[in-house]
Image (cartoon, helix red, strand yellow):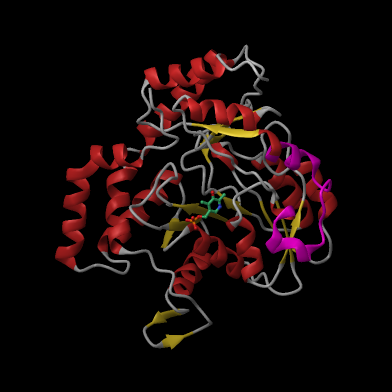
Amino acid sequence: MKVPYFDLPAQIRSLRPELDAAIARSLDTCGFCLGPEVARFEMDFAAFVGAKHCIGYNSGTSALHVAMRLLNVGPGDEVITTPYTFVATSWAISYVGARPVYVDIDEQTMNLDPRLVERAITPRTKAVLPVHLYGHPFDLDAIKAVCARRGLPFVEDAAQSHGARYRGRPIGTGGCLAAYSFYPGKNLGACGEGGALVTNDDALAQRARSLREHGSTVRYYHDEVGYNYRMEGFQGATLNVKLKRLPAWNTRRRAIAHRYHELLRDTPLRLPHEAPWAESVYHLYVVRHPARDRLKAHLEANGVGSALHYPVPLHLQKCYAGLGYSAGDFPVAERAANECLSLPVYPELTDEQVAYVADTIRAFKEW
Ligand SMILES: *Cc1c(COP(=O)(O)O)cnc(C)c1O
């Protein structure tokens, strides 16, 4: 049996007539840059998250960059964040000339450890940027408490967690802003690049719209230096088709995760932990073991795709050598990077495929 790590063609095939019609609508209206499909998506996604405003961008990276601009983060400032995430989380901080200040992650949730955040705060700290990693929320109340005590804003990087819940409520409105990505591999993906910010703050929302359109609300009048970060009409159209599916897709991801949990619980693997206050949407199903390279090769040899998220923590990346960190600074993140292995988890995966992945792992003897 073959189990690809991710099967985008299967997802697109299942939606093809609706996607064709949505793209045809965009061609009819010529709404290519923003336009009516994007406006509709922004309304519906805001409702999905339970936020007052949603602003669409051309990528999640752009949305995060604008979030840093909105908080007036700039040269000389520090932003506290996690070293264990996709690099774009840190790009946002670097793009505005500020310094990413890493603190280690929590062993259970793999997210920024709230206890360590407080100790990293200095007079230069301007904001905190935690990530809801793998679809599992970070401890919002704990982060909120630290930030409130020290008068700091925080931005949620929700690029991997569309629809995840914290104490029963959707994440995305706990801080002043939350950033989403609609990269095709995410739980909600466009047919191309896309991203969004959500917020309940009217003033932030207005400036967030202006910054994506050259810092302008009235054409050819520019209030501040902005960007061309508009979401494309085609992407709004494809996202409108897919957003309707998202709740069912997330339910299916959770069912697959629970099935893996049953089938793998008595293996030497360390399985993902779901905190009692969390409802993960399992963007990734990441198991851990020191022999993960051998296990990965064994899976590959038996037709099962897998991946690493993430093999190198950000403080050890070449691009951030200038920050002055070294190996051993964040032992929890470093150990995770050496042990992590992402198994296939996507709505199109069949029960037979899930069972085959588990059987293949159980047949592995070189732990
Ligand atoms: C995907 C991702 C991003 C970047 O989103 P793009 O749309 O690819 O620019 C940022 N942060 C995290 C945690 C991500 O997973």
Magenta highlight range:
316-337
The spot of residue 18 in percent (x, y) is 19, 45
Q: In which quarter of the image is residue 91?
A: bottom right
In magenta stretch: residue 319: yes
- Residue 274 in view in this figure: no
Q: Give yes or no for residue 121 being in the magenta stretch.
A: no
* Residue 227 coordinates in the image, percent (x, y): 48, 75
Q: Which is the main secondary structure of the residues drawn in magenta? A: helix
Q: Which x, y percent locates residue 85?
A: 63, 48
Residue 65 visible (yes or no): yes
Vertical relation: 275 (above or below) 219:
above
- Name which residue lies at 68% across and 27% down: 289
Residue at the spot x=77%, y=38% of the render? 332
- With respect to residue 194, does 258 lie above or below? above
Which residue is more in the foreground, 72 or 1? Answer: 1
| Residue at the spot 78% in from the left edge and 63% down from the top edge | 323
Establish if 285 lies above or below 70. Answer: above
Picture quarter with the N terminus: top left
